[in-house]
Amino acid sequence: DTEVTQTPKHLVMGMTNKKSLKCEQHMGHRAMYWYKQKAKKPPELMFVYSYEKLSINESVPSRFSPECPNSSLLNLHLHALQPEDSALYLCASSQGDQPSSSYEQYFGPGTRLTVT
Amino acid sequence: SQELEQSPQSLIVQEGKNLTINCTSSKTLYGLYWYKQKYGEGLIFLMMLQKGGEEKSHEKITAKLDEKKQQSSLHITASQPSHAGIYLCGADIARASNYQLIWGAGTKLIIKP
């Protein structure tokens, strides 16, 4: 099973709302990722969790707040977003237990976020 | 200039024809990944290459990494409508930073019936 699930599939929120995106994997992967993807562009890395600890934060604004409650779950809390934050948000996971090794990342279907 | 150059940017191919997409770096590729994406959906992992000269195949798709580990190609034989989508290459260019992939700009593949 190489499935990563994400909810919701679509989300429309106002600039004053607070919402959360959820991601789950049951592959025993130790690394989980949040990406942002704008139309016709490759994914941009936002955050990486390794063994449930935040290991990479790519200078993401504080209105995005990641959380890793356990090894299978990854959340992205959203607050006071701007219209330019509208994008496809992708979650991914990889085996990631050897930092010097290469592992493929498995992606979820994404959440299409629209900020109005 | 981009660290990972992907070409062509788009490709229109008659159904049944073969095609090749390339991904080139000026740096050594410690891991090279090919993904396919349908519009608005997640990335589907196709293949990973690590060793110079390595070649992998799955159904009608073959990916190769050159001996110098700086260029990869994705070849589709006898293309079908199901092959349509955006193909992305991603790469580890720093051995100690495998979490951070660099990405090509993507190749949009259209299959004409």
Image: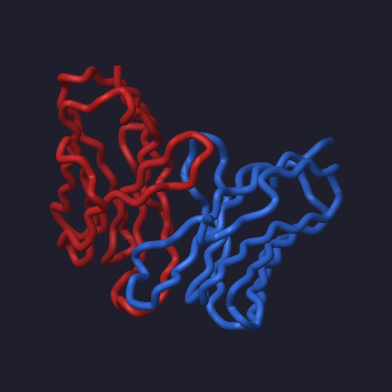
- By what rule are the colours in the image chosen? by chain
- Is A106 located above or below residue A84 in the figure? below
Q: Is residue B81 left or right of residue A110?
A: right
Q: Which residue is rendered at x = 45% and y = 60% of the image?
A: B102
In this picture, residue A92 sits left or right of residue A76: right
Q: Position of residue A30 (x, y in %)?
A: 26, 66
Q: Is residue B76 above or below residue B64?
A: above
Tell me the blue chain: B
Q: Residue at x 44, y 66 (%)?
A: A104
> In which quadrant of the rendered view does residue B76 lie?
bottom right
Q: Height in image: B36 above or below B38? A: below
Count the numbered circles shown: 0
* Residue A103, position as x, y percentages in the image: 41, 70
Query: In the image, residue B55 lies at what x, y percent?
Result: 67, 76
**Residue found 31% across the figure and 78% down from its top:** A98
Picture quadrant of residue A70:
bottom left
Q: Is residue A17 above or below residue A106?
A: above
Residue at image position (15%, 40%) is A62
Supply the letter of whichever chain is red: A
| Whether residue A80 can be seen here | yes
Q: Nearer the viewer, residue A28 or B57?
A: B57
- The answer to which of A72 and B1 lies nearer the viewer is B1
Residue A96, horizontal then vertical, whole percent: 32, 70
Which of the image's four quarters has the C terminus of chain B? top right
**Does residue B59 appear anywhere in the picture?**
no
